[in-house]
Image (spheres, grey):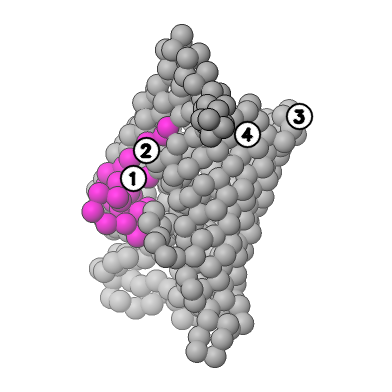
Amino acid sequence: MLLFTTLLAMCSPLAGDANDSTAHAPPYKLSGYADVYYRYNFQNPKDAPYNNLTSFTNSHNSFELGMISLKGEHTIGKVGMVADIGFGRRAEEFSYADDKTRFIIKQLYLTYSPTEKLKLTAGSWATHVGYESVDPYLNRNYSMSYMFSYGPFFHTGLKADYQLTPKTTLMAGVANPTDLKSASAMPKVLIAQVGTSSGDDKIKAYFNYQGGRQLDSLRLQQGDVVLTYAFTPQFSFSYNGTVQYRSERTETGWQKGTTWWGSAGYVNFDPAPWLGFTLRGEYFSDRKNILGFDQDILEATLSANLRKDNLTLIPELRLDSGQQTGGLFVNSAGNVRKSTTTALLAAVYKF
């Protein structure tokens, strides 16, 4: 009898929410986008990756399909669900560790908000680390930064978001190793974020973290910061800095750790509602050869955004330059080059 009474007491809040929710139509939202692009590298390389060392644009002199994405959201009372799926090369590269039908799942998570300030989330969601997003309509540059390409894409696990003040939020969670939707008998990692903003929301700051054992033989710690400042509604500046530390275990024990890091600034200017410009400057350091570059890379990208209703055209010019004579890029004859220049035209339709 005591057990029955206890279970009844635990379930009564949920039952009450269900009864209350029947009086209102549950909110449902369907959104999505599609993107296509053309990329031309002026060194005219003949082989993949065509002087492209970042995500989602590994092509040259070719019209390409990016991704078609559909996102369904449903909430009723204190619970909700988000299902976000994608098809295309961008989806395949985003879920590079998945096979069969799992790669089409960009995000799939359930939420429960026991109070107005606390929300619990279980499932798989896009990472909080970094400034850029897998969804091109959320970015003003179409090509991706090095920091995005070699940081985490998504996390699968359980997290809690807490509204500490009207302008400050906290997030903490536990997840599978980076970019794994399934990780049986594998270690788990910790994730966290502190987000805050000024009273007028002109200044925003996010301090991000992921850390733990990615494998039994690999430890990883990553700290990341995103800062934004809106000088006016038409002119803003954003900054993203990240550093990732790795340590491997060999037969002789845990080895001395090494790091890669990156730093990028974004200058955004919208002279008209239909026209915007973004200049991204990024410095990416892999001097310890963790990612295979064995040097620093400087990247500058200038993008325009031409908007007409739900459609955005993004013409873009990009320069990538290695900081050592050896070179990371090649020309049409296969000779190495220190730098490379790329032109790109993308179209993104959002609904």
Task: State the image quarter where residue 230 is shown.
Answer: top right
Is residue 321 shown to the viewer in this render? no
Give the magenta range: 81-106
Q: Earlier in the sequence, mark 3 or mark 4?
A: 4
Q: Is residue 88 magenta?
A: yes
Q: Earlier in the sequence, mark 2 or mark 3?
A: 2
Which numbered disc, 3 or 4, marks the residue closer to the eye?
A: 4
Which numbered disc, 2 or 3, marks the residue closer to the eye?
A: 2
Provide the secondary structure element on which disc 4 rests.
Answer: strand
Residue under label 4, please give it. 118
Tell me which residue sits at (36%, 26%) in the image: 30
Q: Is residue 294 magenta?
A: no
Tell me which residue sits at (35%, 42%) in the image: 346
- Marks 3 and 4, how far apart in space? 21 Å
- Marks 2 and 1, how far apart in space? 6 Å
Provide the secondary structure element on which disc 3 rests.
Answer: loop
Q: How many marks?
A: 4
Residue 129: x percent and y percent? 56, 51
Q: Is residue 284 above or below residue 289?
A: above
Residue under label 3, please give it. 199
Residue under label 1, please give it. 105
Which numbered disc, 1 or 4, marks the residue closer to the eye?
A: 4
Q: Is residue 199 above or below residue 250?
A: above
Q: Give, as a three-letter code, the residue at label 3.
A: Gly
